[in-house]
Image (tube, rainbow, N blue to C red):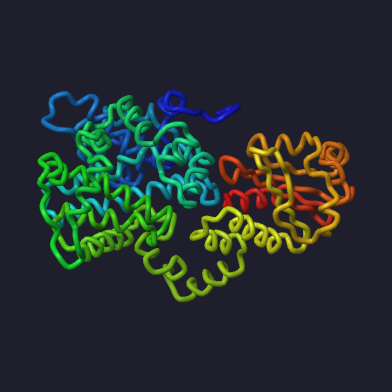
Amino acid sequence: MKNKSPFGLNEWLLYLQDRKFPVGSDSIAKLRKQIKTPDATLDRMQKNIASEPMLAFAILNQANAIVTYKRNDIKSPIHAASMIGMSGISKVFESLEPYTPIAKNHVHRAFSREVQISYEAAFMARRWAIEKKISHVEDIFWVTFFRDAVRWLLWFHAHDEMEQITQKIRRGETNIAAENSILGCRIDELTVALFKHWQVPSVILDSFLTDQIPTAEELQSIARLTHTPDQLPGFAEDKRITILMNSPLILAYCASKVSQEANVVGWGSKNLPFYYRVIAAIIHIRLGDAIQSTHFATAEAALDARYSIKPSLAAQLLSPILFTRTEGTAKSSTKKIKANPLTQLQAKLTDVTDKKQRATLAMKALLAIFKNQSDQVLILKHSNTSNKLSPMLQYGYDINTLKGIRWNSPSNIISKLVSKRVAVHFDDQKFSSMAKDMPEGAEALLSSKQHLFLASSPANETDTYIYWLAGKEQLDRDQFETFKRVIKLAD
């Protein structure tokens, strides 16, 4: 993505299909050494393979591509490794990209977080399969785990776009609408195309196809079978729905949806009760038992904790603050959250969907974060339909001065801000040239000693908010990054 982000199914397919899978450098080095060791066995490699999700995924694909005489798909990466042997594993290195995970790197953290979300979903599907008394529960575990592999890659190679999608979903947009607006396609349809290219086991691919998975209307029909919390669900009269309910793939599908929803929106999401009803109908248990089974699965995932970059779903049922190893760390964690305006902002925004209210919270956060560097924040609102710009919120400015500015006079800077999402830092060198490109009269708000941060944020299809923060004197690059982060949280 040198100039612009890909947009549309074909562009994303071209962008991602030849990308190598990110795998920890240490794990690749260890695996190379194990392969060259004469007495090495696959048993000794299992832990290394299972700890690296994209390595396991690559081995699984390799086995299903080269093993011709097999009754069914190979679903477990450990089984796949035993099928292709040392020579087959050595060929996998061509599709891997070594990287050194850095805890402070937001891309690496997001990648690991998404893997953990899939891991939690896999535990849900396996628990439900046990409750339904389905055989081969471990196969269901791996199908569920790997079905979101493309989502992992998107967080690794297109972090900003995925962050925008997440913010839209948290503001109440549907997943489909958010994905189409940012990517130009649905992640599921991109996943199907990439899985075909990589020769992923067909059973994982089937978990996205409407031949194997219920449509939205059919899911509604399944949910309606669970009438009340105290009664067992009824039985479907439609033959296709009965077949779908008996397929293990519907468990993988629902587990992914529940895990994503609980992680992105939270356990209080209004969509989760719908999936609980679907699961209750599929397993033919009471609604309360379906909820209990789901929560129990998250506890199992937390105890296993193979991927633990974020508080587990089990912890989030209580409180992320309480999920600590010791009493001492719990206290320090509480103090840290109370003292961090960014953390407080993120918590406050969770249940706020009104755009102006989110902007108000962002302004308060900026004043708290920059209280020693700035006491002047302004948020302007631009209407694309009327092409009008006007102050919406402000702190530290004289009202009469703001009213005296001709905000709708020609301005190259404002035009740039409203045409696309952009952030600008006006320092000493840029300040003099900037003043003449601002709306007429805006120079009354600034002095030559100040630095100025400006950033635009689309509020909806017709309105754009412009955030304006003036420093008392100079502002540095790290402060600019913090400024942008606050606005991204409020998007």
Q: Is residue 137 left or right of residue 177?
A: left
Q: Is 173 drawn above or below residue 39 in the view shown?
A: below
Instruction: Write the residue at 15% across / 46% down.
Output: 245
Between 476 and 5, the residue placed more toward the observer is 5
Identify which residue, 297 or 264, lies in the foreground.
264
Residue 456 in the image: x percent, y percent?
A: 66, 43
Residue shown at the point (47%, 34%) measured from the top left: 183
| Residue 416 relative to residue 153: left or right | right
Towards the viewer: 133 or 273: 273
Q: Quadrant of the N terminus?
A: top right
Q: How many marks?
A: 0
* Extreme residue in the front direction: 386
Is residue 306 visible in this depiction of the protein?
yes
| Up/down of 283 relative to 174, above or below | below
- Using the image, determine if residue 377 lies above or below residue 162: below
Residue found 73% across the figure and 44% down from its top: 389
Residue 438 appears in which quarter of the rendering? Answer: top right
Q: Residue at x 51, y 28 (%)?
A: 6
Q: Position of residue 272 (x, y in %)?
A: 32, 56
